[in-house]
């Protein structure tokens, strides 16, 4: 409550005179004075009003207040990415007198404590959104800040691709999302062309009809045509002939010259032609009528000049991929390559897709087990590797999912089941260029193969182990990355093989890396980036076979390691290398595939992610007794303790993120649609923010604890 100052000047001798008089004279003098003082106070205060805006007196401190209020956004960070069209913005505000209001893009925020904390919900449009947050006080002082939120589709594995080479745009269908997307191959911008489960139910394949700028999509036993400019959809004519129903169909080819579609039933081996004008469907070849004993068809391509279809097929006994040519003119089929293998390969090949390369009279095949692209010359049927996955991505998992049509400038698009983004493959040089979604922050180092992370609250950063780059420090405020330790730099000490787990040793300013490939623990100095082997399980009689998670009692220099292959928990003294078997799952039914372990020094116990029905397990180190909590039908991959709210967070398969009260079994599920493949989770020390690593999107999410809103702040 604000009051104006009123000053009275009374001479000292007058005061002395008053108090020197006797009591009678004292009251006779002081009473009128007090009445006069009260009247003046009432007049000066405007009748007792507490409204800071109730006076137009220019000498009023409110009107002479020139100090701006301040406002800050606690969620989301300054630059983020989301696929949501509505976002809760949360922040704080302060003023030297009193905050009047906070406005976000014209929307007045709500608050229960005079805007010390505030929040509001804002709508987002697809693309770049700039949010202006403005705070004002009663004197009219204003301050503001701006944050950037990009709205872009974030989707999982692409089921089929089409390449518009003239516009440098890829069109992709997602069966899980019932959607057709466009992807700008220059800047990575993604847009939703159409998403509608009633009209675009489980789209399987796509082809571009350049003549009328449309896409033909097969969805739930029907072909539809989608105008790529207006997104208008029409059902193509379909003559329902029960004799020619598809049993199991995953692929089609557009023969634009003859205005028809080729469809192969991958189980029966029947090949159909569908006339686009009439919808008439006809059987043009039946593999069952040949003596080839055809296997499961995994892909096919068409060479129009020879009117020939090429089919890749997979046999289970023995496990082999073959290549079959079907001449539609002579109505004959021939297995032209038995057991497709890349040169000098020992292991079998699994061909997941193929395309005809008219520029070089060859077939381009995706080899799913290695991630390589193979070429088969049709003149002599020789096989070569034209693009090696290992060369461009090292040992990063790569599972080719879809191959687009080939452009006239010798390029093809390749999608991957195991990682976000498309690759543009130059079929002459073999070079792959990855086209990821919108980069956050822009012009920053990109994650390649992030495996795990830990939060360093004191320095406002996340420390991420990237299996292709090394240790990256990521600012929690801006998302910017710095490479602390380069995995390829032998001058920085011990080399890493398969780093899977990272923990922070605050006392020694270092991180501890669990390398499952070396069965070793490697310390990385956060100032120099130097790496040192602290424990080498490969050079001792180790109790470890395939360690998957570790945590540490840094006070006593002890490591606790969970081994998912041995189904055991091992204690390692890092001072002398001594090993102790703490617990073992004899029945291989509880933590038989556990991925993570956390040491709780306050309670002197270990928490282990569960498996086969158990959500998590607590091991009491006082007596090594074991307790199991919760139920799950799928294993969890990571675990974090939220000490502020006395609970634990876990992430698992199907991107499930749950919060479970400590020592309890009931859980609260987060919105799993936030993520594609949630892999690791951490909580800040105040329990206000939750961080999740999405392995598929190669992205770090930040989640506000109270609103449960989540956005990508670094990828």
Image (tube, rainbow, N blue to C red):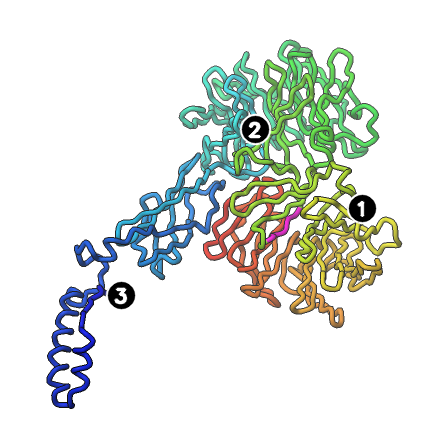
Residue 72: x %, y % from top left? 42, 50
Horizontal side of 622 relative to 421 (left or right) equals: right
Say whether disc 3 or disc 2 marks the residue closer to the N-terminus. 3
Q: Nearer the viewer, residue 458 or 603?
A: 458
Q: Secondary structure at mark 3?
A: loop
Mark 3–mark 1 Cα distance, whole angstroms, equals: 68 Å
Question: Residue 206: within the magenta?
Answer: no
Image coordinates of residue 382 in percent, x first then y, are 78, 16
Q: Which residue is mark 3?
A: 1
Q: Is tag 3's residue or tag 1's residue first in the polypeptide sequence?
A: 3
Could you classify mark 1 by the number of other residues whose Cα lies within 10 Å: few (under 14), some (14-19), or many (20 or more)? many
Numbered disc 2: secondary structure: strand
- Residue at the far front: name it: 13
Instruction: Point out the stretch of residues depicted in magenta.
Output: 452-456
- Image quadrant in which you'd find residue 603: bottom right
Which residue in the protein does label 2 denote?
205
Kindly report the distance in space between the C-alpha atoms of the residues bearing marks 3 and 2: 68 Å
| Foreground pick, 58 / 702 | 58
610 shown above or below 214:
below
Dot 1 or dot 2: first in sequence order is 2
Question: Are discs 3 and 2 less than 8 Å apart at CB?
Answer: no
**In the image, residue 627 above or below residue 652:** below
Q: Is residue 549 above or below residue 660?
A: above
Q: Nearer the viewer, residue 167 or 267?
A: 167
Q: Mark 2 and mark 1 in contact (Cβ < 8 Å)?
A: no
């Amino acid at each position: 409550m604000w009051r104006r100052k009123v000053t009275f000047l009374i001479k000292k001798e007058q005061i002395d005179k008053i108090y020197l008089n006797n009591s009678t004279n004292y009251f006779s003098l002081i009473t009128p004075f007090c009445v006069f003082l009260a009247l003046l106070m009432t007049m000066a205060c405007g009748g007792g009003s507490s409204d800071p805006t109730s006076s137009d007196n220019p000498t009023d401190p409110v009107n002479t207040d020139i100090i701006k209020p301040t406002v800050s956004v606690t969620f989301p960070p300054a630059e983020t990415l989301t696929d949501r069209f509505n976002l809760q913005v949360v922040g704080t505000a302060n003023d030297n007198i009193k905050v009047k209001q906070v406005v976000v893009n014209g929307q007045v925020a709500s608050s229960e404590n005079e805007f010390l904390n505030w929040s509001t919900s804002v709508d987002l449009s697809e693309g770049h959104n700039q949010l202006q947050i403005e705070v004002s006080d009663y004197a009219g002082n204003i301050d503001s800040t701006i944050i950037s939120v990009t709205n872009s589709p974030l989707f999982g594995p692409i089921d089929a691709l089409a390449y518009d080479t003239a516009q440098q745009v890829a069109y992709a269908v997602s069966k899980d999302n019932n959607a057709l997307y466009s992807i700008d191959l220059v800047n990575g911008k993604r847009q939703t062309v159409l998403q509608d489960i009633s009209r675009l139910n489980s789209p399987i394949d796509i082809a571009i009809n350049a003549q009328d700028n449309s896409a033909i999509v097969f969805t739930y036993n029907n072909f539809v045509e989608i105008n790529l400019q207006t997104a208008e959809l029409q059902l193509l004519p379909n003559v329902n002939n029960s004799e020619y129903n598809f049993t199991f169909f995953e692929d089609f080819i557009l023969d634009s010259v003859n205005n028809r579609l080729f469809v192969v039933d991958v189980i029966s081996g029947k090949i159909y032609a569908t006339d686009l004008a009439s919808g008439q469907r006809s059987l043009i070849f039946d593999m069952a009528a040949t003596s080839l004993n055809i296997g499961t068809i995994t892909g096919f391509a068409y060479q129009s000049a020879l009117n020939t279809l090429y089919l890749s097929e997979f046999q289970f006994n023995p496990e082999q991929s073959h290549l079959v040519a079907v001449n539609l003119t002579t109505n004959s089929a021939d297995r032209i390559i038995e057991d497709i293998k890349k040169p000098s390969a020992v292991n079998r090949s699994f061909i997941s897709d193929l395309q005809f390369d008219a520029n070089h009279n060859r077939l381009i095949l995706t080899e799913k087990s290695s991630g390589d692209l193979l070429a088969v010359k049709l003149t002599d049927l020789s096989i070569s590797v034209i693009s090696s996955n290992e060369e461009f991505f090292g040992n990063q998992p790569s599972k080719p999912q879809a191959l687009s049509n080939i452009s006239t400038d010798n390029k093809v698009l390749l999608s991957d089941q195991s990682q976000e983004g498309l690759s543009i493959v130059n079929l002459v040089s073999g070079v792959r260029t990855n086209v990821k979604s919108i980069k956050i922050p822009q012009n920053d180092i990109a994650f390649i193969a992030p495996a795990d992370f830990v939060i360093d609250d004191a320095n406002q950063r996340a420390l991420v182990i990237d299996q292709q780059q090394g240790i990256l420090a990521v600012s929690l405020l801006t998302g910017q990355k710095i490479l602390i330790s380069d995995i390829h730099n032998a001058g920085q000490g011990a080399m890493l093989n398969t780093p899977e787990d990272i923990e922070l040793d605050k006392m020694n300013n270092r991180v501890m890396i669990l390398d499952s490939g070396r069965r070793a623990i490697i310390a990385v100095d956060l100032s120099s980036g130097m790496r040192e082997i602290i424990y080498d399980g490969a050079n001792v009689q180790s109790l470890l076979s395939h360690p998957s998670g570790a945590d540490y009692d840094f006070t006593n220099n002890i490591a606790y390691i969970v081994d998912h292959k041995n189904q055991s928990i091992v204690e390692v003294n890092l001072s002398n290398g001594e090993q102790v078997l703490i617990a073992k799952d004899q029945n291989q039914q509880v933590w038989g595939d556990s991925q993570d372990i956390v040491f709780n020094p306050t309670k002197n116990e270990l928490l282990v992610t569960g498996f086969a029905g158990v959500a998590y397990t607590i091991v009491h180190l006082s007596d090594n007794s074991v307790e199991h909590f919760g139920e799950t039908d799928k294993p969890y991959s990571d675990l974090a303790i939220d000490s502020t709210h006395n609970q634990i967070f876990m992430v698992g398969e199907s991107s499930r993120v749950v919060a479970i009260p400590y020592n309890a079994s009931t859980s609260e599920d987060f919105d799993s649609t936030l993520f594609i493949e949630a892999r690791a989770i951490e909580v800040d020390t105040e329990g206000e923010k939750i961080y999740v690593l999405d392995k598929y999107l190669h992205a770090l999410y930040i989640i506000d604890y109270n609103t449960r809103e989540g956005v990508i702040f670094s990828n």
